Image (cartoon, rainbow, N blue to C red):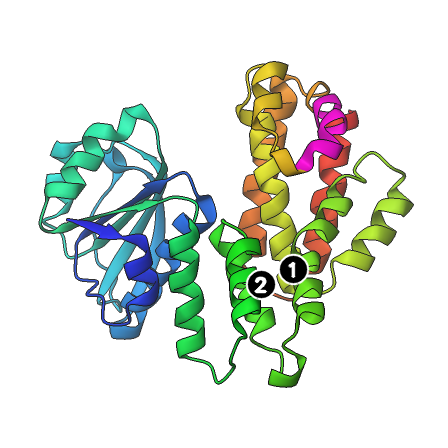
Amino acid sequence: MKADALDLLLNKNFQFNKKLYFISGNEKTLIEKICEIIIETYRQKENVTVTNIDNIDMFVGEIGLFEDKKIYLGKNCRGINEENLLNIKNTNNTFIFLQENSQKIKKIKNFFGKDENSCLVDCYELDKNSKIKILNNYLGFSKLKLDQDIYWFLIDKLDNRYVFLENSLNKIFSLNQNDLNFTNIKKVLTIDDSGKEKVFFSLLKKNSQIVSLYREKIITPSDASDFFYYCRFLCQAIIDSKNKDEYARKIPVYLFREKVFMINLYMKYSSEKKKRLLNLLSSTEKLLRRGVDLKLVLGLRFLLNIKKITIS
């Protein structure tokens, strides 16, 4: 079956009862969020553990002595084909596969969309209607009331990427009713967007300047998480682009003032450096997921390591 990503996010009565889940699309933060929701829902119902796998061919279905079942999580997992999927459906476990869109997975997505005991979720950047539904959901669980002008301002200005939108809304809805005005809301949105951009674009400055700006703009663990995902978005474009012209087309329009800097940055990257950058993104994300206390330190170390790779 095929499920709507917003339905999984907002519908508290959604039935998570499938053996196989395939979460795909081009919005990485939403893909990760849907995965977290599925895992947390199963954990609330029964004793489960999560095990990462990278190849179904090497999978051995086994139940631990003190576990009801396992959830197997495969990010860009190899060996996903109809034969293997039919085999693993016979186990007592749940499988979640995360995969960005590509032509190679079209056939597999078709299988998940039609199979009754499987669930396909496509995750794309949020449009206006999606942001309206999410904001209305927040309002439904909050005592706060928004003026119409502020409401539509948020719909227009909130990020199209879920994790950034969610973090902004959490900060806005932590305000008191008396503080819910344009001035304070604009401060929140500025912290989430332009403030963090300035930190990344200081990448080639002296380390002392980078550290000073980072400490000024990245204040909370939540800020550090936002900063990482923002940097990952910019770095992934460098990794994925085959040449300067392709990369230039990927630079968001709103970053036109930084276009020269970004192209110059891209030109410093060889294939080997791109591999090192990809490994840095992967290792940092794993560390960030382990705990809140170290996020601020990890964010700064992450930025300085990007610089080290860039100038090496």
| Front-lying residue, 284 or 55 | 284
**From the viewer's perspective, is residue 165 above or below residue 113?**
below
Residue 189's tag is 1
Residue 259 in percent (x, y) is at 71, 28
Disc on the earlier residue, 1 or 2? 2
Residue 232 in percent (x, y) is at 59, 41
The part of the image, by quadrant, that contains residue 233 is top right
**From the viewer's perspective, is residue 15 above or below residue 62?**
below
| Front-lying residue, 178 or 29 | 178
Magenta region includes residue 121: no
The part of the image, by quadrant, that contains residue 239 is top right
Residue at 79%, 26% in the rendered image = 311
**Callout 2 crowding tier (Cα within 10 Å): few <14, some 14–19, many ≥20:** many
- Mark yes or no: residue 72 visible: yes
Residue at 73%, 47% in the rendered image = 301
Identified by mark 2, the residue type is: Ser
Furthest residue toward front: 149
Contact check, label 1 and label 2, Cβ < 8 Å: yes
Instruction: Report the magenta residues as a range.
Output: 255-265
Q: Circle 1 — which element?
A: helix
Residue 287 in percent (x, y) is at 58, 52
- Mark yes or no: residue 291 visible: no
Residue 168's tag is 2
| Front-lying residue, 177 or 99 | 177
Magenta region includes residue 260: yes
- Determine whether, in the image, residue 265 is placed left or right of residue 61: right
| Front-lying residue, 128 or 9 | 128
Residue at 77%, 41% in the rendered image = 304
